[in-house]
Amino acid sequence: MRFDPASNHLSRRALLKGTLATAGGAVVMNWGGLTSMPALAEEVKKHQKHCILLWMNGGASQFETFDMKPGRPTGGPFRPISTNVPGLQICELMPHLSKQMDKVAVIRSMRTSEVDHPGGIYLMHTGYRSSSTVRFPEVGAIVAKYQGRDGTSLPNFIKLATNGEAGAGFLGPKYQPFGIGSEGGMPQFSFGQMEAGRELKRHDLRSFAEEQFDDASHSEVGKMHPKPTRPHAGSRADARRSRSTPSGPNRRTATATASSASAA
Amino acid sequence: MTYRSLCLALLLAGMASAQPLRDVIDTEIAKAQQREKVKAAPLAGDSEFLRRITLDLVGTIPSHDETVTFLDDKTSDKRAKLIDRLLDDPRFAQAQADRWDLILFGRNPPGFDTYKREGFQTWLRTRFEKNVPYDAWAKELLRAEGTSADSSAMYFAQYRNAPEDANEAISQIFLGVQLHCARCHDHPFEEWSQRDFYGMAAFLARLEVVTVGKKGNDTIYAIGERGTGDILFTGPAKDAVPGKKGEPVKPKFLHGDPLKEPAAAAKEAKFVANQMPPKPEFSRLDAFANWVASPTNPYFAKAIANRVWGQFLGRGLVHPVDNMSPSNKPTHPELLDALTRGMVENKFDLKWYIRELVNSRTYQASGLGSGEPMPSWFQHARTRPLLAEELADAWRVATGHAAIEAAGGKKPANTGRFRPLESGYVLRFFGSPNTGTGDFQGGLHEHLYLNNGPLMQMISAGKGSLEEFVGDKTKPIEGRIDRLYLATLSRRPTEKERAKFAKFLTEGGPAGDAIWVLLTCSEFRFNH
């Protein structure tokens, strides 16, 4: 995966206010740079930055929001208004946002060669056209990989309702979105029906079985399989257990599919 | 050279090729291990071997009874006999077809309706049932004859109007080479040029997915081939500008000759709805299929020899198996040549080939005490996660569902491939447990499913189930725990394990929970 040299981002982004100075005086720019510059990734991590992607599928047209075309055949019925950034105009229906536009980066130059919605959604989520041989991860999974906290009891990538199903792609199930339904429901199987005491005993026995396999095989395999975390006793046991992230570190092993990428 | 010495030389040459492939494998592998100063693991124990071979050949674990019979068998050739029996088991065809379906379609195939491919899957399974030679069925698949209902036609339905995609996939799967970089530019460090890519894609440029009828609610498709039409080459993607017309590219075999073909048909045949499309006077696709699946094709035999080796030994001699190139050299070049030669000499008989692989000492090495899941020098067994299909089938065998169903007992409400589990969940949570680059990863969703999903209901299979046996307090505790381990992990428990589980069960721990522990643990999740 390749991104533009960081310097390109720096100069462009330095124009914006509210940027994040790193220890070395550099400025943190877009999330793409996180994957190519470890120092920046560390810095962003320290500041506990989060990435929120609001995907407005079928939302208002850009011609009526951020890319007005007054006086052109494509121009709509509304008029543009000036904003607190000289030269940047947006739709008159957003007077409050117009006073905050110094905090917004508007991209008007983007075009793609995708002709249909699904391909375009995939491209915008992953940065790649869909390929028959490679499963690309979407932006949330990328941020989870480079910015996510290990050992946290909350998933690093949460998706509320869904549009675009690229998921974690080749980054693997560890970065798969924790999908919450549009009505706010938890993912399937988040809750068990089991009484906490029984659950504890069952997990104790399972930990024992895992140890036996570790000892016998001296293999790293035991460590890559999700290990149960001890359920927390008490009334909130179920809810908290559901948020545990049991997946161990990612280790190399033979892939489940027979081919490296085509079948994966 | 005297007549005598000539005879001797011929005799020696004859002997060399008469040496069983399994012995060639062990010799070459041992040679490389000595050179690399790695120590080979001892031969796997009977339990370890039994579970591994059963999963690899028939895609599930052995039942309790099969396990006990094999472990108690004292004859010296019981492994070879077991291999022969499993190779003739109907489940062998199913398991290999599952694997090839995954290679050819993946979990989320492109193309309309391609998820409904029972016709294709049946066709594929039948190839393995009849042990049709690989080159024959590969050729059949690539010629795309018949319809999606009764043959392999669905394969090309994935690549509707996308000859470039079809070319990428076919060259990767059947030739073991990755051309996709050359789609947009000359490959920076391999020998493929962009012209090579389009020369190959040109063979596939005239294909069309045609609707030829209905079967119930399902549309039946066939692959039509036009008599005219070319793929257009516009040069490097970076120089592309809107509206720029490309130049037509003629078909050319990869690193071979251009196709000799008659001029394009003067009049284009019409494809009529609900009728099989007529064959063109000259078929580029047939020429392509004949070239790809030819024993003299420099890539084809080597690619399948390497791929099937990787399937059973964990990694290809060229790894990954579909990236053979001058910059990705085989770890054991002489062995790869011998495997390729054997494949051609035995006319692409995959069953023969697999029999040789799994009878080798190399395949039967222990995986215990090893560490590395994919050892480069094959000094010990590889470890691989079970496919979703294998995992669900293994749960069915272990819990007793399979036996109860076979005995005509309780019929599950759902009759799908993953019964009694919902296939949607199993595929979603266990369908691709890897990063696409060979790393295994369990995820949070897999864990939640194992922890809170329908496994407990599955374990409670009623009369004749493992739960019934393990929970039967009138039986001696040792026998119950032996049964538990034999039915799930195909081995007897250690003393330590017996003590721990005895304590759990006698203190009132439910039998279902003990079974759940062994169905969800790593030892069950992997083939090792």
Image (cartoon, rainbow, N blue to C red):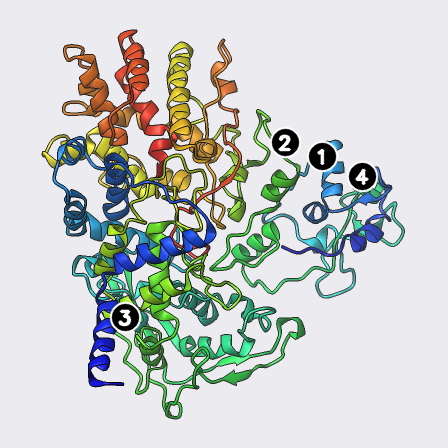
Task: State whether residue B460 is above or below residue A27.
Answer: above
What residue sits 59% from the left and 68% below the top? Answer: B189
Classify residue B318 as left or right of residue A118.
left
Of labels 2 and 4, earlier in sequence is 4
What residue sits 50% from the left and 31% below the top? Answer: A247
Residue A15 locus on image (x, y percent): 87, 49
Q: Are marks 3 and 2 on the same chain?
A: no
Q: Chain of mark 3?
A: B
Cα distance between the residues tagged 1 and 4: 31 Å
Secondary structure under the numbered disc 1 in the rendered image? helix
> In the image as oriented, which residue stretches furthest toward the left?
B407
Going by the numbered disc 1, the residue's amino acid type is Lys
Task: State whether residue A6 is above or below residue B268.
Answer: above
Secondary structure under the numbered disc 4 in the rendered image? loop
Q: How would you rate the neighbour count of disc 1 (Cα within 10 Å): few for under 14, some for 14-19, many for 20 or more? A: some
Going by the numbered disc 3, the residue's amino acid type is Val
Tell us which disc is closer to us: 2 or 4: 2
Q: Nearer the viewer, residue B357 or A173?
A: B357
Tell us which disc is closer to us: 3 or 2: 3
**Residue under numbered circle 3:** B344
Secondary structure under the numbered disc 2 in the rendered image? loop
Q: Chain of mark 2?
A: A
Contact (CB < 8 A) between labels 1 and 3? no
Cα distance between the residues tagged 2 and 4: 35 Å
Residue B296 locus on image (x, y percent): 33, 77
Contact (CB < 8 A) between labels 2 and 1? yes
Cα distance between the residues tagged 1 and 3: 56 Å
Of labels 2 and 1, earlier in sequence is 1
Residue A211 locus on image (x, y percent): 42, 24
Q: Which mark is residue A149?
A: 2
Q: Chain of mark 4?
A: A
